[in-house]
Image (spheres, helix red, strand yellow):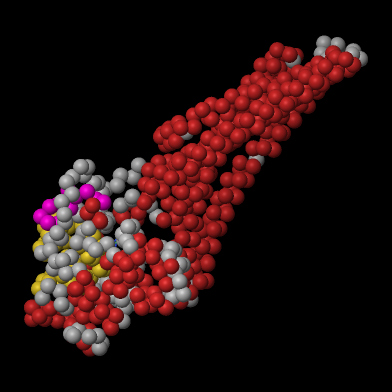
């Protein structure tokens, strides 16, 4: 419930609509409540007495109240949906923004499937709940209370029936409403699982096909799908009992009213119109209660959604950016002092006691076994993750003391996995530098040795990439990702294993371009190939989260057994280690 209160601020800008909607609903309910009484008068004072002009007058009144009720109902629907749609649009916007600013740790914590559920079905659930709340929350109780009061005033002879029927109805409504909250919470959990599975399977569809795991994946999906089916079925069936059950109780009430009424009419102590009006009001009592309970069920379903959304909105980004810091020009010298880092708290560190200093403009090669922490080390520079212990400094200043945006603007980072967007090549490069000119784009593409293949595409720079850039080869993707880092003209250039899928001739061209065009930038080149880093000013050899050796290519060939081993195996495999 606290989550609902926290989200109520999103209704505030539309508070006027949110007030008008229930007021309009009051008008509709008021008119609805008048109908049975008018009917009673038509029967008892008009038809029974043969007073035609009275009957016509009452029909006119009935029509007028119906029309006013219609205006109230339509008005309520319009304003309720205006409030709810605006509420959900604003909330979706904020949620999306929050997720965009998530730290990588937060992104790993909330799975993609959960975040997609948050942005789609959770918000939709809240929108529906709000619409119902504004439309029906007034209608239900008003109709319920109004009908009871009118029966007490106009059909007191049959009032005892209400005294029996209403508590029974109320008990069942309460019971089912409480139950539905628990049931739908369980359903939502499986919806998360289904979304995560869909997301994962679709993203990895090529691997699944290549490894002939289609049947296995379909079977896995079928399992979660069956779980969802079972839980949804259980929830729907249990909640589905409520409707017929309430109708049954009301029917018993009608039978009792007819029986009691018939005796009283026979004794001339009751008029027929009163019985008819009572039956109508009894139905209204039931509708009032059912719609109130429907709103409560919808709210109960929306509460877990609200809680999940609030959890995302309140996720503390561990990365904080200091305010109003002076933005002196970044030169690019880098110092790591006793840096420790682990992705998951209380697990073995991925970076252990890393210390080094790199002068601005130097090239650092990072090589090591798979999983030794190379990518993790370079991710500390643009603060994709923050160190657990120790300090990372740029130009002698702790990177946490830099404005985050400013710091990142100085870094050109081409990650190991070339993530490109389903936009044109030019637009993808503009992610690196929004204000880049056509000339900048051409130069960046040339430096990444990508111009040649881009020129062969029919629309060249305007060639639209598919989602995940599946219409490019691995090496082409890597070259575009590199061009995106180059176009920034960064002070710190980080290339994380970006030439693994690039042929050796192209790699040589790229290396030459980096040396000539980015002479002033400090360059971190992660690679598993010695040929990619052998000219670096310093090479770090990493093993199990530590820098186990450091020096130039020639020095390491003499001093580091691990480096020697890598050089030997790469030479045996025919990988060029030297020129
Ligand atoms: N997001 C993450 N969450 C948890 N653990 C992670 C995450 N990313 C990497 N790791 C773990 O951290 C360790 C170091 O990973 P890292 O990617 O830095 O290695 P690497 O040396 O770059 O490997 P490779 O050469 O295979 O790219 C590995 O054991 C890996 O499983």
**Quadrant of picture, ligand 1:** bottom left
Residue 551 location, quadrant = bottom left
Residue 502 location, quadrant = bottom left
55 relative to 346 in the view: left or right: right
- Quadrant, the N terminus: top left
- Between 337 and 72, the one lying in front of the other is 72
Rendering coords of residue 503 (x, y %) = 31, 81
- Residue 217 higher or lower than 265, as above or below: below
Rendering coords of residue 326 (x, y %) = 17, 46
**Residue 142 seen by the camera:** yes
222 relative to 245 in the view: left or right: left
**Residue 163 seen by the camera:** no
322 part of magenta stretch? no
Rendering coords of residue 291 (x, y %) = 62, 32
Rendering coords of residue 381 (x, y %) = 21, 59
> Residue at the location (29% across, 75% down)?
499
């Amino acid at each position: 419930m606290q989550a609902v209160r926290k989200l109520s601020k999103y209704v505030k800008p539309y508070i006027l609509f949110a007030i008008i909607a229930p007021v309009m609903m009051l008008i509709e309910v008021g008119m609805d409540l008048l109908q049975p009484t008018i009917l009673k008068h038509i029967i008892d004072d008009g038809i029974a007495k043969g007073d035609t002009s009275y009957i016509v007058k009452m029909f006119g009144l009935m029509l007028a109240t119906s029309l006013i009720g219609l205006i109230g109902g339509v008005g309520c629907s319009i304003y309720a949906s205006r409030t709810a749609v605006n509420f959900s649009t604003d909330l979706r916007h904020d949620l999306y923004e929050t997720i965009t600013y998530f730290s990588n740790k937060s992104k790993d914590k909330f799975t993609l499937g959960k975040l997609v559920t948050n942005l789609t079905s959770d918000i939709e659930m809240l929108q529906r709940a709000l619409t119902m709340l504004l439309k029906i929350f007034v209608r239900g109780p008003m109709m319920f209370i109004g009908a009871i009061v009118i029966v007490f005033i106009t059909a007191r002879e049959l009032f005892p029936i209400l005294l029996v029927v209403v508590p029974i109805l109320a008990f069942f409504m309460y019971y089912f409403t409480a139950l539905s909250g628990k049931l739908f919470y369980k359903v939502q959990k499986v919806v998360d699982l289904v979304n995560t599975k869909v997301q994962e399977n679709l993203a990895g569809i090529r691997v699944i096909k290549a490894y002939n795991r289609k049947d296995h994946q379909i079977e896995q999906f079928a399992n979660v799908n069956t779980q969802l089916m079972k839980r949804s079925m259980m929830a729907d069936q249990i909640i589905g009992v409520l409707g017929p059950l309430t109708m049954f109780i009301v029917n018993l009430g009608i039978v009792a009213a007819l029986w009691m009424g018939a005796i009283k009419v026979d004794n001339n102590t009751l008029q027929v119109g009163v019985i008819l009006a009572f039956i109508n009001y009894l139905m209204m009592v039931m509708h009032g209660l059912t719609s109130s309970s429907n709103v409560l069920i919808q709210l109960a379903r929306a509460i877990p959604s609200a809680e999940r959304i609030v959890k995302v909105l309140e996720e503390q980004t561990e990365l904080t950016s200091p305010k109003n810091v002076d933005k002196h020009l970044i030169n690019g010298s880098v110092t790591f002092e006793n840096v420790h880092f682990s992705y998951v708290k209380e697990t073995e560190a991925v970076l252990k006691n890393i210390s080094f200093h790199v002068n601005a403009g130097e090239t650092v090669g990072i090589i090591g076994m798979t999983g030794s922490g190379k990518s993790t080390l370079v991710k500390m520079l643009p603060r994709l993750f923050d160190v657990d212990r120790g300090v990372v400094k740029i130009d002698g200043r702790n990177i946490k003391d830099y404005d985050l945006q400013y710091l990142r603007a100085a870094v050109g980072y081409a990650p190991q996995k070339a993530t490109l967007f389903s936009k044109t090549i030019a637009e993808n490069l503009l992610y690196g530098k929004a204000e880049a000119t056509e000339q900048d784009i051409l130069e960046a593409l040339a430096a990444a040795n990508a111009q040649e293949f881009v020129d062969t595409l029919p629309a060249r720079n305007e060639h639209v990439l598919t989602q995940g850039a599946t219409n490019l080869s691995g090496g082409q993707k890597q070259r575009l990702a590199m061009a995106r880092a180059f176009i920034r003209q960064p002070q710190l250039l980080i290339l994380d294993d970006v030439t693994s899928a690039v042929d050796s001739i192209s790699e040589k061209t790229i290396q030459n371009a980096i040396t000539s065009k980015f002479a002033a930038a400090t360059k971190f080149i992660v690679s598993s190939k010695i040929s990619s880093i052998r000219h670096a000013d310093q090479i770090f050899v990493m093993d199990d989260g530590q820098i186990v050796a450091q020096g130039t290519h020639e020095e390491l060939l003499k001093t580091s057994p691990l480096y020697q081993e890598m050089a030997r195996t790469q030479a045996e495999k025919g990988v060029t280690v030297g020129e």
